[in-house]
Image (cartoon, helix red, strand yellow):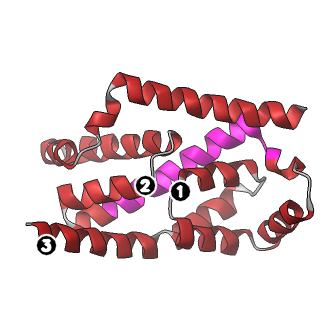
Amino acid sequence: MRRHLRLLAVVLFLALLWALFEWSGLRGHVTPAFLRERFEHDLFWGMLAYSSLFALGNLVQIPGMIFLAAAVLALGRVWGGIATYVAACLSCCLSFWVARWLGADALRELPGRFARRVLARLDSHPVQSVAVLRLMFQTAPVLNVALGLSGVGFRPYVLGTLIGLPLPILLLTLFFDSISRLVR
């Protein structure tokens, strides 16, 4: 019963954040024009605004790819990729801590052989497992929550995230930069 309450707390919290994000009009600020304006006005505050929107967006289950595309369109290939890497790492850490704070390690209590096998792999090779998951799913919001609820340690989570994110961010940055050049 306790496991179900923790999982319910996570779902309710994320749903509440999503509703606030939608109804407050913040979603309208996730545009290349807004980001470009923030960065042009002040690099520090622009990066803070971008990272905050990325983290909030990740908590309300908006894929990081949207933020990456906006950053590349607003800042270009190099600075957009760098800004996204920094913001993505911060966002993943925040999502992890929110899920861990609300749900502890609720996934450890799931029944079934498959769940035990997946968690055993995560326990035996945590950095490698997180890195491979990041290569495949980048900053997928549901992955952040699942890893937060998995009981994996924060240090292996961060190391796996730092190792696994650069390649997909680089490839997606090049992709969105190519698309933006074709459109112009």
**Residue holding disc 1:** 140
Amino acid type, residue under disc 1 in the picture: Ala
> Dot 3 lies on which element?
helix
Label at residue 64: 2
Q: Are marks 3 and 2 in contact (CB under 8 Å)?
A: no
Q: Mark 3 to mark 2: distance in Å?
A: 22 Å
Q: Quadrant of the C terminus?
A: bottom left
Residue 149 at x, y percent in the picture: 74, 48
Earlier residue among tags 3 and 2 = 2
- Residue sitting at x 89%, y 48%: 109
Instruction: Answer above or below: position of 48 versus 17.
Output: below
- Magenta segment: 82-106
Earlier residue among tags 1 and 2 = 2
Earlier residue among tags 1 and 3 = 1
Q: Nearer the viewer, mark 3 or mark 2?
A: 3
**Residue holding disc 3:** 182
Instruction: Answer above or below: position of 156 versus 49.
Output: below
Amino acid type, residue under disc 2 in the picture: Gly
- Relative horizontal placement of residue 81, taking residue 62 as reference (left or right): left
Residue 155 at x, y percent in the picture: 67, 60
- Residue sitting at x 58%, y 34%: 14
> Dot 2 lies on which element?
helix
Amino acid type, residue under disc 3 in the picture: Leu
- Residue sitting at x 38%, y 46%: 51
Location of residue 103 by image quarter = top right
Q: Is residue 86 magenta?
A: yes
Q: Quadrant of the N terminus?
A: top right
- Relative horizontal placement of residue 101, taking residue 124 as reference (left or right): left
